[in-house]
Amino acid sequence: MHRTLIALAIAVLTAAPAIASEKTDVMAVVNHWADGFNKGDSKMELETCADETSIVDDLSPYEWHGAGACSQWKTDFDAFLKKHVITDMKASLMKPRHVDITVDHAYVVVPVSLTYKQSGKDAKDSGVFTLALQRAVTGWRITGWAWAAH
């Protein structure tokens, strides 16, 4: 009985660092996407996406999916910004509400604060960024995300 409890305790204690490391790796991808977004660096944003991705966002056409979805979203997003005279957009990720990992899939929910200028005037917004990621040979990649504005 004591050996079983000791073995269980050792298993739990050794698994905790591995889980923490996985969460760090997953969030590194999410943060890399946000860094690219904040720098206006499409390459940084797009390198976090899997080849096949699904996106739901609050700008028309509201959903993108399949091969090249991230790239098409970026094109549509940039057109939206131009049409609405939005510049200097920055996303600040808050403490994640969920970073759940099951084998090679991850689910992340993170509140976001946005600041930007619209027609030269300061503006702000907030919302929730919900992502699904999958571990690939090259590391974690975003396979889906949705934005819900508050």
Image: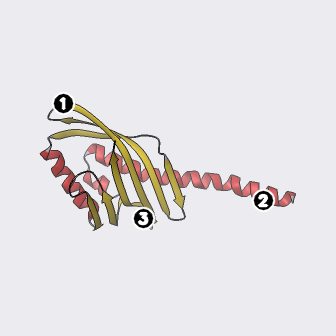
Q: Is residue 140 visible to the viewer in this orientation of the structure? A: no
User: In the rendered structure, which amino acid carries the disc numbered 3?
Assistant: Thr
User: In the rendered structure, which amino acid carries the disc numbered 1?
Assistant: Lys
* Foreground residue among 22 and 119: 119
Q: Which residue is mark 3?
A: 138
Spatial CA span between label 3 and label 2: 34 Å
Q: Which residue is painted at 40% across and 47% down in the image?
A: 31
Q: Which residue is mark 1?
A: 121
Q: Residues within 10 Å of mark 1 (few under 14, many from 20)?
A: few
Q: Which residue is painted at 84% across and 59% down in the image?
A: 3
Spatial CA span between label 1 and label 3: 41 Å
Q: Is residue 69 left or right of residue 24?
A: left
| Dot placed on the residue nearer the N-terminal end, 2 or 1 | 2
Secondary-structure class at tag 3: loop
Q: Which residue is mark 2?
A: 7
- In contact (CB < 8 Å): disc 1 and disc 3: no
| Dot placed on the residue nearer the N-terminal end, 1 or 3 | 1
User: In the rendered structure, which amino acid carries the disc numbered 2?
Assistant: Ala
Q: Which residue is painted at 50% across and 49% down in the image?
A: 98
Q: Quick one: which residue is furthest to the top in this view? A: 121
Quadrant placement of the C terminus: top left
